[in-house]
Image (spheres, helix red, strand yellow):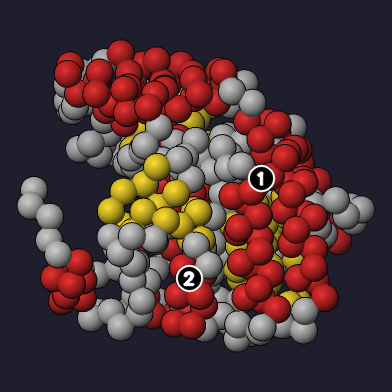
Amino acid sequence: MEFLPTDRLMDLDRQHVWHPYAPMPNPRPTFPVRSAQGVYLELETGERLVDGMSSWWTCIHGYNHPQLNQAALDQMGRMSHVMFGGLTHQPAVQLAHKLVELTPAPLQHVFFCDSGSVAVEVAMKMAIQYWYNQGQPQKQHFLTIRNGYHGDTFAAMAVCDPVNGMHHLFRNSLVEQYFADAPQIPFEGDWQEADIASFAAILETHHQDLAAAIFEPVVQGAGGMRFYSPQYVKRARELCDQYGVLLILDEIATGFGRTGKRFACDYASVAPDLMCVGKALTGGFMSLAATLATTEISQTFAQGEAGVFMHGPTFMANPLACAVALASLDILDSGDWVGQVHRIEAQLRQELAPCQDFSAVQDVRVLGAIGVVELHQPVDMAVVQPQFVQQGVWLRPFGRLIYTMPPYTIEPDQLRRITEAIVTVTRQDPG
Ligand code: PLP
């Protein structure tokens, strides 16, 4: 590949490349990255930015990690891809075994796919087909909670927050699902049963039509960056059992240590019937996701009408991605992610605290390696994004939220660059 001069690159980008949640052509500031190393993104224009986003929760060990690179190179020398229908291979089998070991005990079976949204689609289809297999084909609806985010494909979008997700744009193509009020009791708040009353009421009224409840445990990510009581997750599990409804936990953002536990559901000691993982699974190296299921669910498929689960992506269990994921889990196992995440948490708490006093700020909250400053007004991205870059950090606010979830390997002085930039920008009212 020939390298284009930066002006030409950006011209072509503006003309032809559609960026996420961006208009086309794109008038917004966009920054060309040449390479990435450790916690730094290196721009074509020469700046080095401390990455506060981990490329949307994924890059937990930092960029260009030698062990991940080596795992990819080794696997490339054997095969980078092979179909998964009728064939299997070392990386997929070993990764499935590892995921079964790491996740709550009832989850025994792993369905690989290529992205988080698809892992959610797979979980929802599994739930529907499970009830079909059990002679209850009417159980095809889902219960979720407001402020959630589960991806941008149609079934996933239908269980995202209806307002944030602009459901009205797609209303004739989108299945209407049931939305309980978002949990209000914060992570360390005292539990009150009223917090889950609306979830319980929907279950009571509609359980006969409900295949599953689906939500993000403890941390709601892109739908609002909210942290809530693990007791909600515990009670939701009990209520789902009481009403004969499956529980799907979406750990795509929270999985692999981000919240301070390996999985956020560990805070509640809850095992779901189906769990979705993705994002940090390969340490941000490449796309891979998975849906894990209990034996209770999987064993019904052989006797169901189809006899099989009706899904099979072309790049399912890509060997390169599985080999890198195994290497990433090895790095987690052999390293001190618990200590790293707790150190980041303590530093974020201390250094973001001053934001609480600024007039533009509504709330400051930290859990694990996630720091959030919520403003009263939406951020003006055209102004704020270049300001962060000028200060040598990469942060990507959305709506009223400025937030960071850095790589676990970030050093205190590098993290301080991020917190100082957030303090500077929020002090001067970024709205
Ligand atoms: N679920 C959660 C909780 C997420 O945060 C995301 C992505 O942000 C998804 C699902 C969708 O994952 P992907 O973007 O890989 O499709």
Residue in the foreground of this view, choosing between 408 and 138: 408
Q: Name the residue under label 1.
A: 412
Left/right placement of residue 363 relative to residue 295 reads: right
Is residue 99 shown left or right of residue 348? left
Residue type beneath disc 2: Gln
How far across and how far down the image is residue 285, in percent?
A: 36, 38
x and y, in percent, of residue 392 in the image: 50, 62
Q: Which residue is drawn at 73% across and 39% down?
A: 342
- Which residue is labeled 2 in the image? 390
Where's residue 128, x and y in %?
Answer: 45, 45
Q: Can residue 246 be seen in this view?
A: no
What residue is at 66 percent from the left and 84 percent from the top? Answer: 429
Above or below residue 408? Residue 398 is below
Q: Report the side of 128 relative to 114 (left or right).
A: right
Residue 188 horizontal/vertical position (percent): 85, 51
Q: Which image quadrant for residue 63?
A: top left
The CA span between labels 2 and 1 is 20 Å
Q: Nearer the viewer, residue 415 or 113?
A: 415
Mark 2 element type: helix
Q: Of callouts 2 and 1, which one flags the residue occurring earlier in the amino acid sequence?
A: 2
Q: Residue sitting at 20 percent across and 37 percent down?
A: 314
Classify mark 2: residues with Cα within 10 Å, few (<14), some (14-19) or many (20+). few
